[in-house]
Image (tube, coloured by chain):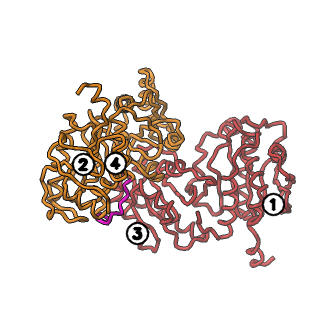
Chain colours: A orange, B red
């Protein structure tokens, strides 16, 4: 196949089903059943084919799960869900609605497999459905922060027209000011600019939030303002520091494509208080396209077919757009 | 007049017109022209009768301004606006749309007069229309924080069903953690509880925000959690610490009557990103009812009759409800 032919093809978007005892399998199959992901991508799942079959069953969907042993075996046929299943989990090992060591061990390996496939270019993008901290702790003793992502990465979160990338994730407010240096702010602004351009958005309009009330303080003068100035001298379309209580509204209203926020809650309060349907989270700083959904494994409602799949559907369609370089940031 | 007869009367709500060069006079007369404030209160204005007449003129309202020299002279008649004018400002001294020393000096005295009338009980509540920092600086050299209010007070801000009282106003993020002590959090929770009860809301449901992401940190363990526990032991209906990115949404959804937030931007981001019409700000910790509106003097649009009066109208009707002890917190 020629390079031109390959480029014309729809991107392969793999979704790792997340914890097989949680809502991951059901939101994945419900999103696929809408038929929308296959319009712009070649979708497949990674995980347990038994868990996928079970989810199709209790959601009452007209789909069939088809086990495959390699991405190359995927057929991408209508109403058939290709599931890359390395056979790590026997059906009886997982009870829907309960964390388990077996699920934790399997998820750990599915994560590694998904990353490897993306790094090798076997898939063009991969999505992580909700994993479960309790299962991972039982299975592999993992206790690190499940939201933080790989080192050197940042999370771009979307909700409607609002898009936010914070400078840090789960660190205490006491430790936040020390992280606001000119170098770090500038590096993130440059990374956001380059990433959005790679995804297909030319000259993205970046808003830089201040740290303090009304963006008046030492960090604005000594770090955020100078970083914005240097970024502008490099041709980046960035404004700021902007008052934290105004900037998110301005992004919602279409004045900016994305906000670089100074700490986790600054953006999360804006995102979660407005809480539009179809929010998703995109990793920045990776050599491949990788997304997740902004909800947990929700063991308490798993297995009843009631979990909302809007976030997963947004992740699947957004992943396809990013991988194809046609991300328009339309809200 | 007997005490019972006085209690039956509608409360007197005075509105200081704010900077006579800003939008204060026009939002005040437009709010009065709706006829709603006089349904639940006896409204009057404090300031320059000339400025009020001018605002009535350029807003094209069917009202008449009537100068009075004391509250006792107010007649509270339909379509007549009683203006308590101590005669500090000649009409030619102020140009609409421009700050001035004369306006700053007059505003400083109108503020003192309003406070004195409220302290003496001559008025049951008073509202501050937007003052102007530039005028005050020109007129009286004032440079302090115009949002902070008198010492020992806190601002309860409303927007739709969301109501927030922050632990502090304009202090830097670096200085925030030191303000989060068990004693200070407990004192504010108790003050909010007592104030809402006095306004007529029995057993208000108070949400206490955490400081750190997902409310997990030292301040939650050592200060916020213990303060909530002690408050509950005193019979106060308080929950927390609650994750800062979840608590404001929960208040919007009706689960709580009010959120005590840990710093200015935490609540302001939620309030301003959602930005419902008719937001107002209520001082807590004063022996009388005192409100303000959450917008500035807006010199750039003053004099054209285009300023939105929804915030001022909300302040006037809310002031009447608080003074009458029938604040229901309906959103």
Image point (77%, 63%), residue name: B38
The mark nearer the N terminus, 4 or 2, is 2
Q: Secondary structure at mark 1?
A: helix
Query: Which residue is label 2 attached to?
Result: A45
| Residue B168: % across, % down | 49, 51
Q: Which mark is residue A172?
A: 4
Region in magenta: A300-309
Among the 4 quarters of the image, the one containing residue B241: bottom left
Location of residue A186 in the rendering, given as x and y in whole percent from the top left corner: 38, 29
Assign a secondary structure to mark 3.
helix
Q: Which residue is mark 1?
A: B71
How packed mark 1 is, by other alpha carbons closer than 10 Å (few <14, some 14-19, many 20 or more), is some
**Residue A113 appears in view:** yes
Q: Nearer the viewer, mark 2 or mark 3?
A: 2
Q: Nearer the viewer, mark 4 or mark 1?
A: 4
Other-residue count near label 4 (Cα within 10 Å), few / some / many at <14 / 14–19 / ≥20:
many
Disc 2 versus disc 3: distance between alpha carbons? Answer: 50 Å
User: On the rendered structure, is B136 left or right of B47?
Assistant: left
Q: Residue at x 23, y 27 (%)?
A: A1
Label annotation for residue B230: 3
Say if the magenta span includes residue A230. no
User: Does A331 appear above or below B258?
Assistant: above
């Amino acid at each position: 196949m020629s390079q031109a032919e390959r480029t014309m093809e729809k991107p392969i978007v793999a979704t790792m089903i997340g914890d097989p005892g949680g809502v991951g399998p059901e939101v994945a199959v419900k999103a696929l059943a809408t038929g929308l992901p296959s319009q712009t991508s070649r979708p497949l799942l990674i995980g347990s084919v038994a868990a996928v079959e079970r989810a199709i069953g209790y959601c009452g969907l007209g789909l069939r799960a088809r086990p495959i042993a390699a991405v190359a075996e995927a057929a991408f046929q209508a109403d058939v869900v290709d599931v890359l299943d390395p056979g790590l989990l026997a059906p009886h090992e997982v009870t829907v609605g309960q964390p388990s060591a077996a699920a934790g061990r399997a998820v750990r390996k599915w994560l590694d497999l998904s990353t490897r496939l993306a790094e090798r270019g076997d898939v063009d993008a991969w999505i992580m459905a909700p994993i479960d901290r309790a299962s991972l702790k039982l299975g592999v003793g993992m206790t690190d922060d499940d939201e933080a992502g790989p080192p050197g990465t940042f999370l771009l979160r979307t909700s409607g027209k609002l898009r936010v990338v914070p400078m840090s994730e789960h660190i205490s407010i006491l430790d936040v000011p020390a992280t606001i240096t000119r170098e770090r702010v500038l590096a993130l602004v440059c990374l956001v600019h380059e990433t959005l351009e790679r995804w297909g958005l030319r000259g993205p309009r970046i808003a830089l939030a201040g740290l303090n009330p009304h963006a008046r303080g030492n960090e604005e003068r000594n770090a955020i303002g100078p970083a914005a100035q240097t970024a502008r001298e490099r041709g980046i379309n960035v404004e700021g520091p902007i008052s934290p209580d105004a900037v998110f509204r301005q992004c919602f209203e279409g004045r900016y494509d994305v906000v670089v926020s100074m700490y986790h809650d600054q953006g999360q309060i804006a995102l979660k208080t407005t809480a539009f349907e179809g929010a998703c989270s995109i990793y920045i700083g990776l050599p491949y396209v990788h997304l997740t959904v902004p909800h947990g494994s929700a063991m308490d409602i798993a297995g009843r077919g009631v979990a909302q799949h809007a976030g997963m559907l947004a992740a699947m369609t957004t992943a396809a757009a990013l991988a194809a370089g046609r991300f328009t940031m339309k809200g």
